[in-house]
Amino acid sequence: MVSSIESNMAGWTATLHLLQIGVLIVALLGAVMLLVAGYLFVLELVNQLKHPVRPNDLYWKR
């Protein structure tokens, strides 16, 4: 009886470890996506502030 309970718990433990690895992978992918989004939407726009807009740049050149 004890051995059947232990084997059942070992199966659940293995499943739990697989789910934890899956959650870890999802968290890492989310962190990477957050870093990429921060670079694209924040740091790249701040980098464009180094080049000021001149009045002639606001109109289409004819």
Image (cartoon, rainbow, N blue to C red):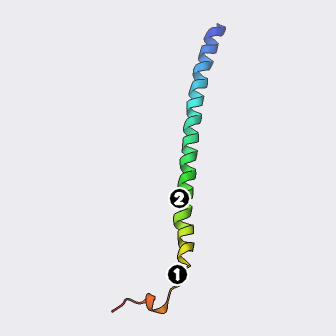
Q: Depth-wise, is mark 2 or mark 1 nearer the camera?
A: 1
Asked whether disc 2 touches disc 1, contact meaning CB atoms under 8 Å apart, the reply is no
Calculate the distance from the C-alpha at mark 2 to the C-alpha at mark 1: 22 Å
Q: Quadrant of residue 60?
A: bottom left
Give the farthest residue toward the left.
Answer: 62
Q: What residue lies at 57% left-to-right and 73% top-to-bottom?
A: 46
Which residue is at the front of the view, 47 or 42?
Answer: 47
Q: Residue at x 59, y 17 (%)?
A: 8
Q: Which amino acid, mark 2?
A: Val
Pick whichever of labels 2 and 1 is earlier in the sequence. 2
Which residue matches tag 1? Answer: 51
In this view, which residue lies farthest toward the front?
50
Q: Helix, strand, or loop for circle 1?
A: loop
Instruction: List x then y, in percent, for residue 49.
Output: 56, 78
Give the image location of residue 34, x and y in percent. Answer: 56, 56
Task: Answer above or below: position of 31 versus 54.
Answer: above
* SS under mark 2: helix
Amino acid marked by disc 1: His
At 41% across and 90% down in the image, what residue appears? 59
Residue 27 in the image: state x and y as whole percent.
58, 46
Q: Quadrant of the N terminus?
A: top right
Q: Residues within 10 Å of mark 1 (few under 14, many from 20)?
A: few
Quarter occupied by the C terminus: bottom left
Figure quadrant of residue 11? top right
Q: Is residue 9 above or below residue 48?
A: above
Q: Which residue is mark 2?
A: 36
